[in-house]
Amino acid sequence: TKRYSVHVIVLCDPQEEQMRDILSSCPQCPPSAGRRKNLEFEPLSTTALILEDRPANLPAKSMEETQRHKLEYEEMVAGAKRRELKEAQKKKRQMKERHRQEDIISNAMVIWNNEILPHWDTMYVSGTRRVRELWWAGLPPSVRGRVWSLAIGNELNITAELYEIFLSRAKEKWRSYSETSSVNDSESDGGASLADRESSLDLIKLDISRTFPSLFIFQKGGPYHDLLHSVLGAYTCYRPDIGYVQGMSFIAAVLILNLEEAEAFITFANLLNKPCQMAFFRVDHELMLKYFSAFEVFFEENLPHLFNHFQTNSLTPDLYLIDWIFTLYSKSLPLDVACRVWDVFCRDGEESLFRTGLGILRLYEDVLLQMDFIHIAQFLSRLPEDLQSHTLFNAMANTHMVSRNRRWAQVSA
């Protein structure tokens, strides 16, 4: 009875609905004599009650009302069919696009494995148009880690044996910390000695739990928790002058998802040794200001209206770029999109990081122009989760990294 009344109350007067409830709840009341018995189909919901006649003790419907109810019901059915058809077409398009992407990835994987990777030195140095276009379209997941590793290189000449040495040192320090309970918080300030900077191993434990929490694989008990802990701990002992800086866990996590443990550490150490990453992780204010100034040059030329809006609201690049650069967008963007950004970063270097930033601003320009300082800062710190890689890369493709015949490297210098 209650199931029927929920829909009828929308279709009838309250008094009619109340009378219908009373009649339907009474086992002695016979069904309406004028009730339709030859429906062409069983109604899938109680909206079909709109076609039913009123009980015999109530005034009958007029012809106009009966016709109107029939038209309303037919419109309901037609609307439901339209929605079902639209949803079916959407799923068909999605499936077709998925198959298309799978074919593209499959073909690209064959090319990378058979043509590019076996001749990496020649292909990478020459930078042929075909290779660059394939790279821009996104690396196949099966070769992504290997290409990243080759593109980033190993200028530091780190070996797997060296990684084991620093990992053993980190484990020894963890044992030492567990025996001495904890380290004095005041020892982790900026003026600490090299040995004290290594005490930032304790900070790693706090940050690991915040790394890709939705994946549930890096948190305590997860399959990659100890692995991430090991890579970060070994790096902290390898570079005690830098120690652990918040945000490193995201970079290491992305590498762990694509490389074996030792190779992930080697790539991680070499990646952080790049000039841009070193400037940010060592908090070199002078170099960071140069990067921010160069970014604003291209920001103003590509998006003058948004640039002026940011200027009016006193929103400087450091308020959003630092977090983006620290984590190479892996914290701010969906993981699959971030990996595409990493693909291009490995191809083009630091310029692509700032081009990505401009692409994000271009993509959401209309939204940002309607916001004030606080809402802009909040929006840029937590970008929409439904951001798609193809929309971002279209925005990046329309971003020009040439200012007065000077490219990024010249402007940033």
Image (tube, grey):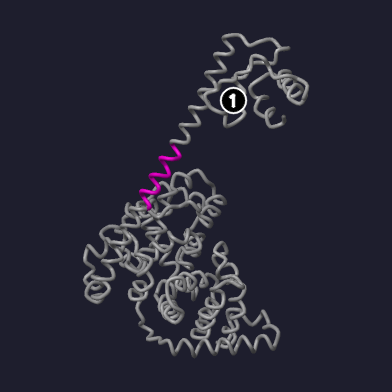
Residue 65, how many percent across, how many down? Answer: 59, 12
Taking 180 as reference, is 410 above or below it? Answer: above
What's the residue at 53%, 76% (across, down)?
228
User: Residue 19 lies in magenta, yes or no?
Assistant: no
| 13 up-or-down from 217: above or below | above
Could you say which is closer to the camera, residue 366 or residue 172? 172
The span shown in magenta is 86-98
**Residue shown at 59% from the left, 67% from the top:** 210
Q: Position of residue 245 (x, y in %)?
A: 54, 74
Which corner quadrant holds the N terminus? Answer: top right
Instruction: Give left or right: position of 159 versus 221.
Output: left
Label 1, residues with CA under 10 Å away: few <14, some 14-19, many ≥20: some
Q: Position of residue 97 (x, y in %)?
A: 36, 50
The residue that disc 1 covers is 48
For residue 267, what is the image quadrant? Answer: bottom left
State whether residue 224 is above or below residue 369.
below
Which picture quadrant has residue 60? top right
Image vertical order of residue 290 relative to residue 150, above or below: above
Residue 358 placement, left or right of 28: left
The quarter of the rendered structure image containing the C terminus is bottom left
- 398 or 121, which is in the foreground? 121
Picture coordinates of residue 263, whole percent (x, y): 42, 80
| Residue 89 on the magenta span | yes
To which quarter of the image does residue 216 belong? bottom right
- Left or right of 102: which side holds 35? right
Main SS of the magenta part reads helix
Q: Amino acid at mark 1?
A: Ala
